[in-house]
Image: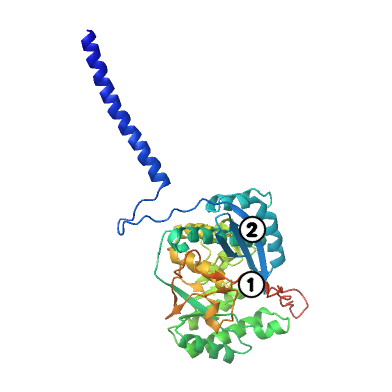
Amino acid sequence: MATHGKVKTTRRNFVMGAVGSGFAWALARNAFSQNAPSPSAATGRVPPPVPKMKITKADTIMTGRDVFVRIETDAGIVGYGDATNHFVPHSVAGMLKDIYPYLIGEDPQRIEYLWQVCYRRRFVRGGPATGTALAGIDQALWDIKGKACGMPVYQLLGGLARTKVRVYGHVSGRTAGEAAEQAKQRAAKGITAIRFRAFHSYDAEDFHEHASAVRQQIEYLAAIREAVGDDIDLILECHGRYDPLWALKLAEQAKPYHPFLIEDPIRHENPQALKWLRQRTNIPLAIGERYHDKWDCRETIVNQYVDYLRPDVSHCGGISEMKKIAAMAEVYYIDLIPHNNAGPLGSAATLHAALAIPNIELIEAPWVNGDPEVDVVRPFPTVEDGFALPLEGPGLGVTFDEALAASKPFRAGGLQPRLNARDGSVRDF
């Protein structure tokens, strides 16, 4: 019995020892895999580890007419984001000042967590100042993460959903002839989609009347269509000026000229009013540049009031929030045409998001309208044959010239046109 017991013990010890050794080896392997990068299968080289970081400083850079976010880490990596909202720049700067304390000491790679912190730790939420401030912070955090990983942001968002993104440019002018000539210039550069809004001459007089504005928009639309032919998509921008009845009149008169869509046909405060218009015209409708988070977009999406949604990556809470808005819209087969009136930094963020989001139709590209001036951020994305190509550098793929920014004093835009009707009552800009 003693011998038998000794044998049993020996066998058990052997088995347990073998199991224990395997368990210890598994633990060691697991620890190594967590703390040391694996060699690349293709090259055998070990990629550098992503550094652990903390946010040490967050600043606002106000330069020219732009507002930027600068986030600094203890790893020496600095990220930049575009928090420019030309309509409420000082409100955005104040909101950033309120939010920055929530970031200090935090891990900048926890982008989703920090988005939630900045939004939900505060009792009052939403609106253009919050949406724009969050957008700048979110872009800067993605910039940091991309630089830390040595990869473009679109790779971190899931990779290329497309290899290039179709763009649209703008035309303006005090007359239909001026707008038509600009449209020919855009088309000659390979731009295949053009947006216009007319009534610039009325803005100069601080005047808006629905009937006059409809007549002028149709005049511009007809002239531009004749100038560029049928192969260019025309976006009829209304800037949210019309009441629903006048938006319908515009749509009916626009039909012979086949606009690609009508943008912001009515005021945005009551999305349900779009339902009445949606039921009465088959011209595609778009809205969304004045929505500032996914909750603002919800009613329009679930009720399918529009064919295209137009969030702005520098106003709607950033790249992270635009992906969520796009996912909500995808369920209803609604595509996005992101609004973008930004310089190179906001345009870069727009492009990275558009490259990775599946339901993108095209993006706004103000830099194709002419020769862009030297900016504190560069470069703008390259456009070939009407498509923006990926930016290949790490992070957002742009460089920020802080010395140049410091040399350009901030000047907020002036008052918007103070539009009145003939009877002196207020009209919308």
Report the amino acid beneath label 2. Ala
Amino acid at circle 1: Ala
Q: Residue furthest top?
A: 1
Quadrant where the image shows the C terminus: bottom right
Q: Residue at x 67, y 73 (%)?
A: 65
Q: In the displayed structure, does residue 32 sit left or right of residue 114?
A: left
Image location of residue 111, percent across then percent down:
54, 53
Within-10-Å neighbours for mark 2: few <14, some 14–19, many 20+: many
Q: Earlier in the sequence, mark 1 or mark 2?
A: 2
Q: Which of the two residues, 129 or 263, is positioned nearer the viewer here?
A: 129
Asked whether the viewer can see residue 111, the reply is: yes
Q: Which residue is mark 2?
A: 58
Q: Name the residue nearer the viewer: 130 or 404.
A: 404
Residue holding disc 1: 403
> What residue lies at 64% left-to-right and 88% top-to-bottom?
174
Mark 2 lies on a secondary structure that is strand
Q: Residue at x 40, y 41 (%)?
A: 31
